[in-house]
Image (tube, rainbow, N blue to C red):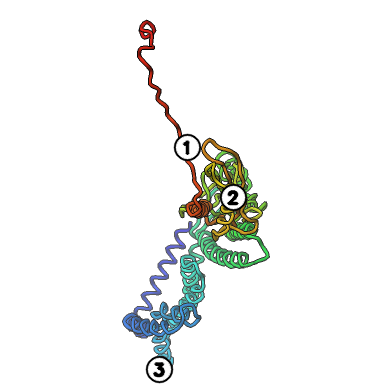
């Protein structure tokens, strides 16, 4: 690091500031800039109120409403720029040079243009970082300080082994990272939105394609940043080998879930919208991520099931090839019931339940002779297992109970007879009693 060059740069800058402070024209321009700043500060509220009132007359999503919202956010620099343009015209008409006012007008114009461009981005954090970087570079260029600043940052350097690291390289890498990632994430969201709107792709292929696009764009962004910062990419070969060893030992579960997620997306055995049952969890697949699948149960509880469990465990997919599901309901009737009539009543009653399909039609079978009842079994189909199975079973049983009461068909319950015999004490041998 060259300390003499840094000291010389600071001394020249301070001398330049003192020379400017002794010039009456410079003082007049500074007063004009400060006065414009004060007027803009105290009048921005009125302009924002007027723009807000005009904004309420248009639909919220219309281009005019968004334009008025952007103008409201830029009310302060717009007023200040208008005042400074007026002052600049006066100075140019009178004759004295007006470099400061001209520089302020250029800075404010750059500020407004950069904020208008970055306001189109959805991610406000990245947009703000890009705006700060772009305006800083524009300001240094307008003031003629860009080249000296770059030279100053280049001199702030140190050696790390055989590599020379300067603050200019670090600054370039930081600015490149902010801009590249801002563009990358915006492009990724745009492509993902187009992929999810495509009807030619299945939901699982849409998810897989979107994730591959995001990973590819982020990887390309990292390589661009590393190459622009002067870092030798081939030096990461050793790091890649160490990362592979770390994955083999410490990250095997994460990698296993990642690979399992890719397999699930490729073979389409489980996809968003399917109704699955894993262990004691029954619900609808809401989303599939790189590490887990989100399953929402009928109780509105969301379970995050690792992708590895969906590969290694037994999974019941109620809507894999078809959403039609057959349910079985055991029914017991008394022995004195008219069984053919009862079977016909059960089948006809099941058809009246709204969620029960008429094709295939409900079927009631006699399964055997029980201890206390004749065992029947009702089988019916539904086409919406995501709305629950037990609730439709309950509806069917309630309707069957109602028709049984109307027709006088008994539903028996287990009965046990207890017989108590009285023993004559005279008949008992006293010796045996002892």
Q: Most extreme residue toward the bottom, as rendered?
A: 93
Pinpoint residue 274: horizontal percent, then vertical percent: 59, 55
Pinpoint residue 167: horizontal percent, then vertical percent: 50, 59
The residue labelled by disc 1 is 414
Cα–Cα span, label 3 and label 1: 112 Å
Q: Is residue 191 above or below residue 77?
A: above
Q: Most extreme residue toward the top, as rendered?
A: 431
Residue closer to the observer: 150 or 220: 220
Nearer to us of marks 3 and 2 is 2
Residue closer to the observer: 124 or 422: 422
Cα–Cα span, label 3 and label 2: 107 Å
Mark 3: few/some/many CA within 10 Å (<14, 14-19, 20+): few
Q: Would residue 120 be visible to someone looking at this image?
A: yes
The C terminus sits in image quarter? top left
Mark earlier in primary sequence (3, 2): 3
Q: Quadrant of residue 349?
A: bottom right
**Mark 2 touching mark 1, by CB under 8 A?**
no
Residue closer to the observer: 296 or 43: 296
Mark earlier in primary sequence (3, 1): 3
Pinpoint residue 3: horizontal percent, then vertical percent: 45, 59
């Amino acid at each position: 690091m060259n300390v003499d060059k840094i000291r010389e740069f600071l001394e020249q800058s301070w001398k330049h500031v003192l020379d400017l402070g002794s010039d009456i024209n410079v003082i007049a321009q500074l007063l004009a800039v400060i006065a414009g700043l004060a007027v803009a500060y105290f009048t921005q509220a009125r302009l924002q109120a007027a723009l807000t009132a005009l904004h309420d007359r248009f639909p919220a999503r219309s281009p005019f409403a968004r334009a008025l919202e952007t103008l409201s956010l830029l009310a302060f620099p717009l007023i200040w720029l208008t005042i400074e343009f007026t002052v600049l015209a006066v100075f140019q008409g009178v004759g004295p040079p007006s470099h400061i006012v001209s520089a302020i007008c250029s800075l404010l114009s750059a500020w407004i243009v950069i904020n208008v461009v970055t306001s189109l981005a959805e991610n406000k954090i990245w947009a703000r970082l890009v705006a700060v970087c772009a305006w800083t570079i524009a300001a240094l260029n307008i003031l003629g300080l860009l080249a000296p600043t770059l030279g100053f940052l280049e001199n702030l350097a140190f050696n790390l082994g055989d590599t020379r690291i300067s603050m200019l390289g670090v600054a370039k890498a930081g600015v490149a990272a902010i801009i590249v990632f801002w563009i990358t994430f915006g492009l990724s969201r745009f492509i993902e939105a187009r992929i999810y709107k495509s009807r030619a792709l299945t939901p699982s292929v849409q998810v897989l394609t979107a994730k591959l696009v995001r990973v590819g764009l982020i990887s390309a962004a990292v390589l661009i940043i590393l190459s622009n910062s002067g870092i030798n990419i081939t030096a990461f070969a050793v790091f890649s080998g160490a990362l592979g060893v770390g994955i083999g030992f410490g990250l095997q579960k994460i990698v296993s879930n990642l690979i399992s997620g890719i397999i699930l997306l490729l073979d389409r055995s489980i996809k968003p919208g399917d109704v699955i049952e894993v262990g004691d969890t029954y619900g609808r697949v809401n989303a599939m991520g790189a590490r887990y699948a989100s399953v929402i149960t009928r109780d509105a509880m969301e379970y995050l099931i690792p992708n590895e469990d969906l590969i290694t465990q037994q999974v019941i997919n109620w809507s894999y090839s078809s959403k039609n599901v057959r349910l079985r309901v055991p029914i017991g009737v008394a022995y004195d019931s008219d069984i053919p009539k009862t079977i016909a009543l059960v089948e006809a009653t099941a058809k009246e339940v709204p969620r029960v399909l008429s094709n295939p039609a409900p079927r009631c079978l006699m399964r055997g002779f029980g201890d206390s009842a004749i065992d029947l079994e009702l089988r019916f189909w539904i086409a919406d297992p995501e709305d629950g199975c037990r609730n439709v079973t309950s509806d069917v049983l309630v309707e069957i109970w109602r028709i049984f009461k109307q027709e006088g068909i008994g539903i028996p319950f287990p009965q046990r007879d207890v017989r108590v015999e009285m023993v004559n004490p005279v008949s008992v041998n006293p010796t045996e009693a002892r």
